[in-house]
Image (spheres, rainbow, N blue to C red):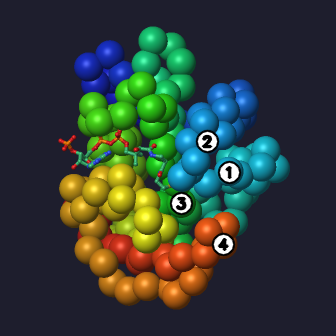
């Protein structure tokens, strides 16, 4: 799978990307800060649950990524992140569109996710992508403690 959209390339995340992906995540307070071990397990071909992990590259360098876990017929969008310099230029939306193509190919019918109540940027992204709120998990997150907002959308 290889897709080029206006000089951006979206491709599968590989083991060699983990350092850069961890650096991007570390630069973004709201992104999940997974350890190397978690990324390695997620990328393993026998990973349970199976993951789809995508990278968006610009100028030959990874500038964003998304990871979804598959629990057919559902997928959970676990993380999506873009470097600050390329935010608000449609990068995450492109990544998500590509992810949806992959999910459709695997007969996934619904994407779910949870997001910190205070993460207004991510919530605005998800709203723009057609996600609908389905509920809350009270005090789900720590540091600071706050609710998780649960969202869903069909794969179509
Ligand atoms: C959330 C995030 C991935 C969005 O990436 P992005 O590439 O900037 O998103 P897009 O440019 O595709 O935005 C698409 C739409 O989302 C909404 N949106 C995105 N960022 C927004 C912001 N800062 N304020 C308001 N709306 C915003 C808008 O509707 C936008 O469309 P528009 O620019 O035409 O108005 C990025 O801000 C990020 O990496 N945040 C830190 C990590 C994080 O919180 N990830 C989510 C939890 S894992």
The disc label shown at residue 125, or none: none
Q: Which mark is residue 142?
A: 4
Does the Cβ of the disc 3 residue fall within 8 Å of ligand 1? yes
Identify the mark nearer the N-term, 2 or 1: 2
| Residue bearing the label numbered 2 | 25
Quarter of the figure with the N terminus: top left
Query: Spatial distance from mark 2 to mark 3, Cα to Cα?
Result: 13 Å
Q: Earlier in the sequence, mark 4 or mark 1?
A: 1
Q: Residue furthest front?
A: 144
Check disc 4 and report its element: helix, strand or loop. Answer: loop
Image vertical order of residue 24 relative to residue 8, above or below: below
Q: Residues within 10 Å of mark 2 (few under 14, many from 20)?
A: many
- Looking at the image, tell me whether mark 2 or mark 3 is earlier in sequence order: 2
Residue for point 30% across, 53% down: 125
Name which residue lies at 67% across and 33% down.
23
Mark 3 in CB contact with mark 4 (< 8 angstroms): no
Spatial separation of the CA atoms under disc 1 and disc 3: 11 Å
* Labels 4, 1: front one: 4
Residue extending farthest to the right is: 37
Crowding near the residue tagged with mark 4, few <14, some 14–19, many ≥20 C-alpha atoms within 10 Å: few
Q: Return the residue at label 3.
A: 78
């Amino acid at each position: 799978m290889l897709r080029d959209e206006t000089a951006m390339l979206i491709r599968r995340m590989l083991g060699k990307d983990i350092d850069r992906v961890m650096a991007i995540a570390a630069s973004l307070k709201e992104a999940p800060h997974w350890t190397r071990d978690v990324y390695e397990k997620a990328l393993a071909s026998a990973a349970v649950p199976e993951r789809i992990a995508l990278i968006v590259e610009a100028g030959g360098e990874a500038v964003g990524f998304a990871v979804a876990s598959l629990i057919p017929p559902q997928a959970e969008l676990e993380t999506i992140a873009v470097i600050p310099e390329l935010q608000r230029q449609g990068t995450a939306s492109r990544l998500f569109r590509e992810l949806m193509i992959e999910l459709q190919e695997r007969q996934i019918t619904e994407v779910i996710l949870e997001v910190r109540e205070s993460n207004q940027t991510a919530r605005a992204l998800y709203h723009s992508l057609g996600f609908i709120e389905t509920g809350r998990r009270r005090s789900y997150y720590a540091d600071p403690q706050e609710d998780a907002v649960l969202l869903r959308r069909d794969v179509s």
